Each structure stands twice: as structure tokens, then as C-alpha cells.
């Protein structure tokens, strides 16, 4: 039988399979007993980065320790790897300098668009390389200007199999 608890701090309801006297809210990290008495947050005196159940990650912003919730990626470093392990700076440079051959698509793990760019450039005896090069140049500039989260959504995990713009 699942027990339903409502956090007095954030107001979110959650369930637990066991009946316990103290629970942790999976949304805000608040600890309280089931009678409603709230426990003040515990601070680690030696490490000020660890407060309210969150710990600071070096690349991925803040991540809650034991509940699996991860807040959005927050880094302004273009060459930092995102959650997928792909750097938008490297992808942008590949698109700008080698984009006519589709190398940036191969880096991102999108082999179909990479092969299309490569074949279009090689079969047309480099006549279409101007077209694919301009498309890739625009993509590279857009990759440098967008946020890491937009880059991940548009080029790494897109809804379409051939992401252009």
C-alpha cells in the first residue's frame, strides 16, 4: 500500500511504499517527519558547496544528490562537453572548416546527413561543395551562438534525422 505525503515546504505530493516516521521530499530535499514537524536543513561545515541536498557539479550545474533530478546545463564555455559528451565549439569549427564534407555530422553521430554531404560534394566534382559549404558555415555560426541546451536539442538529439537549421 502506497502512502501519500505532502511536503510542507514546496507543497508537492509524493508517494512512498513504506510507512516511515521521517521522509525526504524528492522535489526540494526537505526532510520532515510524517507528523508534519519540519527538520531544518543540515549543512556540511567543511564543504559550503553542499547545501539543501544539492551538490555542485563541475560541468553540469547543480544536481540533486540522491533523487536523480538534474537542473539544466549552465555553462558559457563553448568548448565544454555537454551532457551527451559533444562540444558545440568543436562541432562548430568542424562545420565552418570541413562542413562541405559533412564532418561535423559524423562528429555528432549523424551518419546519414554526413554521407549525403560527402557524396554530394564528391560526386558533383566539388561543384556542390559551395552550396554544402555555405550551409555548413551557417550551421557553424549558429552553433557558436546558441546555448548548449539548444545545441543538444537541435543537433545531438533532434526530432528529425537530418538537422539543417
Image: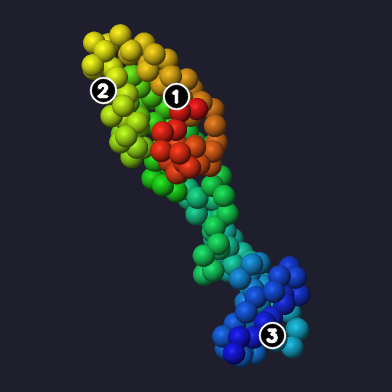
Instruction: Residue 78 in the image: state x and y as whole percent.
Output: 47, 33
Is residue 45 visible in the rendered image? The answer is: no
Closer to the observer: label 3 or label 1? 1
Res. 70 visible in picture: yes
Q: Residue at x 30, y 36 (%)?
A: 111
Mark 2 or mark 3: name the one nearer the start of the chain.
3
Q: Which residue is mark 1?
A: 140
Image height of 82 relative to 29, above or below: above
In this picture, residue 20 sits left or right of residue 129: right
Q: Residue at x 75, y 70 (%)?
A: 11
Label 1–label 2 contact, CB within 8 A:
no
Q: Quadrant of residue 96?
A: top left
Q: Nearer the viewer, mark 2 or mark 3?
A: 2
Q: Quadrant of residue 131?
A: top left
Asked which quadrant contains residue 42, the reply is: bottom right
Q: Residue at left 57%, top 59%?
A: 49
- Numbered label attached to residue 33: 3
Residue 119 got which mark? Answer: 2
Amino acid at each position: 500500500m502506497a502512502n501519500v505525503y505532502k511536503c510542507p515546504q514546496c507543497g508537492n505530493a509524493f508517494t512512498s511504499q513504506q510507512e516511515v516516521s521521517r521522509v525526504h521530499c524528492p522535489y526540494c530535499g526537505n526532510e520532515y517527519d510524517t507528523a508534519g514537524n519540519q527538520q531544518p536543513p543540515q549543512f556540511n561545515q567543511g564543504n559550503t558547496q553542499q547545501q539543501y541536498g544539492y551538490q555542485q557539479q563541475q560541468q553540469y550545474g547543480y544536481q540533486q544528490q540522491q533523487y536523480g533530478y538534474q537542473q539544466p546545463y549552465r555553462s558559457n564555455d563553448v568548448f565544454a562537453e555537454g551532457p551527451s559528451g559533444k562540444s558545440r565549439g568543436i562541432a562548430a569549427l568542424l562545420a565552418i572548416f570541413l562542413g562541405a564534407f559533412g564532418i561535423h555530422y559524423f562528429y555528432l553521430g549523424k551518419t546519414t546527413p554526413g554521407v549525403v554531404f560527402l557524396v554530394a560534394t564528391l560526386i558533383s566534382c566539388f561543384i556542390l561543395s559551395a552550396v554544402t559549404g555555405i550551409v555548413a558555415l551557417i550551421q557553424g555560426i549558429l552553433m557558436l551562438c546558441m546555448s548548449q541546451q539548444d545545441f543538444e536539442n537541435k543537433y545531438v538529439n533532434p526530432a528529425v534525422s537530418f538537422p539543417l537549421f
